[in-house]
């Protein structure tokens, strides 16, 4: 099974990072207000995705990205050198 980390842009320009096996399905779930943060800050688009063969590696990458400042996340999204 393929695991994917994703970064969403939410209402107001905030960023949300998560892990799933199906990004499109998960995006629709966020729109349906199934997650706490995105129920108050609905997602507007998917900005970034990375796939992993193991659940463990995907969750480790998600935790790493969640610790980053916004500037570094935006550089990752843009393919910049701060990563």
Image (cartoon, rainbow, N blue to C red):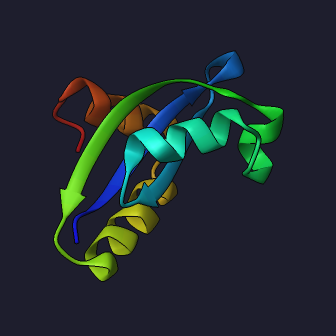
Residue at the far bottom: name it. Answer: 56
Where is residue 73 drawn, in percent x and y? 39, 38
Q: Nearer the viewer, residue 83 or 49?
A: 49
Q: Quadrant of residue 12?
A: top right
**Image check: 78 left or right of 67?**
left
| Residue for point 64% across, 41% down | 30
| Residue for point 42% across, 29% down | 46
Q: Quadrant of the N terminus?
A: bottom left
Q: Nearer the viewer, residue 26 or 4?
A: 26
> Against 6, is 13 above or below?
above
Q: Quadrant of residue 80?
A: top left
Where is residue 40 drawn, in percent x and y? 83, 35
Q: Quadrant of the C terminus?
A: top left
Q: Nearer the viewer, residue 45 or 22?
A: 22
| Residue for point 22% across, 65% down | 2
| Residue for point 63% across, 29% down | 14
Where is residue 55 drawn, in percent x and y? 32, 77
Residue at the far right: name it. Answer: 40
Q: Nearer the viewer, residue 45 or 64?
A: 45
> Against 68, is 76 above or below?
above
- Counting every numbered tag in the picture gives 0
> Against 1, is 35 above or below?
above
């Amino acid at each position: 099974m393929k695991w994917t980390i994703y970064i969403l842009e939410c209402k107001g320009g905030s960023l949300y990072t998560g892990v799933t096996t199906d990004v499109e399905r998960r995006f629709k779930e966020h729109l349906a207000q199934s997650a706490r943060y995105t129920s108050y800050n609905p997602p507007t688009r998917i900005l970034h995705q990375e796939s992993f063969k193991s659940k463990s590696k995907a969750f480790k990458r998600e935790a790493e990205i969640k610790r980053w400042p916004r500037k570094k996340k935006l550089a990752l999204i843009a393919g910049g050198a701060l990563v």
